[in-house]
Amino acid sequence: MPLRMLRYYTDIRFAGHAGHIRQFLIYIGSDRLNMQAGIDEPGLLDYRYGLVDMHRVNCADLLVQDNPDALVLAVLCDFGDRRPQEVVTYIVRRLQELLGTDERRFRDYMTMLEVLSENRDLWAQVEEAEHMLTEIDIERLPSFTIGFKRGEARGEARDGRPAWTRCSKNGCIPTGEFSCQPPVAGFQRIGSNVVRPL
């Protein structure tokens, strides 16, 4: 990493930036930070940059900001004595409050939160926070769409047809995963787990 950081430094200089450059590497990995903060070659090169280990940053500093980027990064920080579920739920609710009706941005930030939460093994807490938000249409979250498409692909792999087409003239034939809406008008809904075709 030190060589890559040095390359970034030289790229900035070659791009024409003549002012003072102060570089920082923000470490978000799941493993313990053990990388160098520069290159020291006596008599040849003494290059340094700052290292910020997100595991050691107090999450309270980011949670108090009204900034979605800061909130999402807070999932990587030190929760101190706070329970992980409380912190994650607060982040998700705050994102919803800050982004209001901008569903696209909310989905983007939820995707970032889902990805970053894996570095802290907080996937279950993020999933729980998503379930607790009754005002959010869960079907609009990226993870729901991805899961739905994967389920469709698995169904099509079995017999080459989209899963929702597995109905006969007389009604639905359960596929083992879900049933589909009967094709004939006037049929009663079959069970409570019927999935309507898209």
Image (cartoon, rainbow, N blue to C red):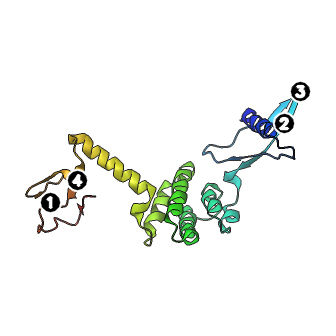
* Marked residue nearer the N-terminal end (4 or 3): 3
* Residue type, mark 3 in image: Leu
In front of the other: 121 or 193: 193
Q: Which residue is mark 3?
A: 44
**Which picture quadrant has residue 15?**
top right
Marker disc for residue 164: 4
Indicate the position of residue 31 as horizontal and vertical percent values: 62, 43
* Residue type, mark 1 in image: Pro
Task: Tell me whether circle 4 and circle 3 mark residues in contact (CB < 8 Å).
Answer: no
* Marked residue nearer the N-terminal end (1 or 3): 3
Q: Label 2 to label 1, Cα distance in Å?
A: 70 Å
Task: Tell me whether circle 4 and circle 2 mark residues in contact (CB < 8 Å).
Answer: no
**Can residue 176 be seen by looking at this rendering?**
no
Disc 2: CA contacts within 10 A as few (<14), some (14-19) or many (>=20):
some
The N terminus, quarter of image: top right
In front of the other: 166 or 16: 16
* Residue type, mark 4 in image: Trp
Q: Label 4 to label 3, Cα distance in Å?
A: 68 Å
**Which secondary structure lies at badge 1?**
loop
Indicate the position of residue 84 as horizontal and vertical percent values: 56, 61
With respect to residue 161, does 140 lie above or below?
A: below
